Amino acid sequence: MLTAIMGAMPDEVDQLAALLENCRTETYAGVEYVQGEMEGKPVVLCCAGMGKANAASTVQVLASRYGAHRLIFSGIAGNMSSEIGVGDVVIGKVVVYHDAEPDMICQSAPFLKEFAGDPALIAAAEEACRTLGVHFLTGKIATGDQFVGDSATKAAIAAKCAPDCVEMEGAAVSQIAARNGIPCVVLRAMSDNADEKGHEKLVVKNFSIAEYVATATAIVHEMMKRL
């Protein structure tokens, strides 16, 4: 089975790329796809770019061009939960849009307002977290085309859909994966608390996210031992 692994930023996939063996690379429609092996199993890895459009188009390529059998999205997010903190992980039991109209989204395939993570991939991610000693929460992830870095926006999103974290790609990834019948899970390591401090750290100061990405990378690597 071919496992597709995606991130949105180069930092989110570079550490994973270093774990691949027997690699070959192809650039298609502006995205570099690296095919190789991880733990002796076939993988295609790519950096989709940030935002819903980049994510959706890349998932379709993974489905149509590469024939991916399952999909793991790995990256960072802004924490929205009091149960976890920066450095911890949210595994997407359900993924929703916070900036779209669900009643309109669900009028086309896969005819869903929200998107469930694949139970087998969720279980593998949970076991990986336990093995690595990573504090995690299996919960709700919310997606929108904006970096959430102020308290007012954070509060508005919390009131609308009460997610455990917020990011920019997961629902689009999950929607197009579901449209193609591809089991999918979204993994997010918390890099900030989706507030003014997070904006200052990640946007204004362009702070390195490598520390948080390392957690997500370790989880994906551990998952591949189980899949």
Image: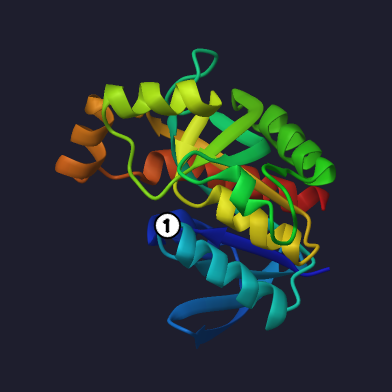
Q: Where is residue 59 in the image (x, y as percent from the top left)?
A: 61, 67
Colour scheme shown: rainbow
Q: Where is residue 66 in the image (x, y as percent from the top left)?
A: 70, 80
Q: Within the image, what quadrant is residue 199 found in?
A: top left
Other-residue count near label 1 (Cα within 10 Å), few / some / many at <14 / 14–19 / ≥20: some
In the rendered image of this protein, does residue 185 appear above or below residue 81?
Answer: below
> Which residue sits at x=67%, y=44%?
113
Tally the marks: 1
Where the N terminus falls, by quadrant? bottom right
Q: Name the residue tied to disc 1.
A: 51
In the rendered image of this protein, does residue 83 appear above or below residue 77?
Answer: above
Q: Nearer the viewer, residue 199 or 101?
A: 101
Q: Is 100 left, or right, of 73 in this rendering?
A: left
> Which residue sits at x=66%, y=56%?
175
> Which residue sits at x=42%, y=57%?
51
User: Quick one: which residue is furthest to the top in this view?
Assistant: 82
Q: Position of residue 24 (x, y in %)?
A: 59, 84
Q: What element carries label 1?
A: loop
Q: Within the image, what quadrant is residue 123 found in?
A: top right
> Which residue sits at x=53%, y=65%?
17
Q: Where is residue 27 in the image (x, y as percent from the top left)?
A: 49, 85
Amino acid type assigned to the residue bearing label 1 in the image: Gly
Residue 1 visible here = yes
Residue 18 visible here = no
Q: Is 13 left, or right, of 195 in this rendering?
A: right
In the rendered image of this protein, does residue 47 appear above or below residue 148?
Answer: below
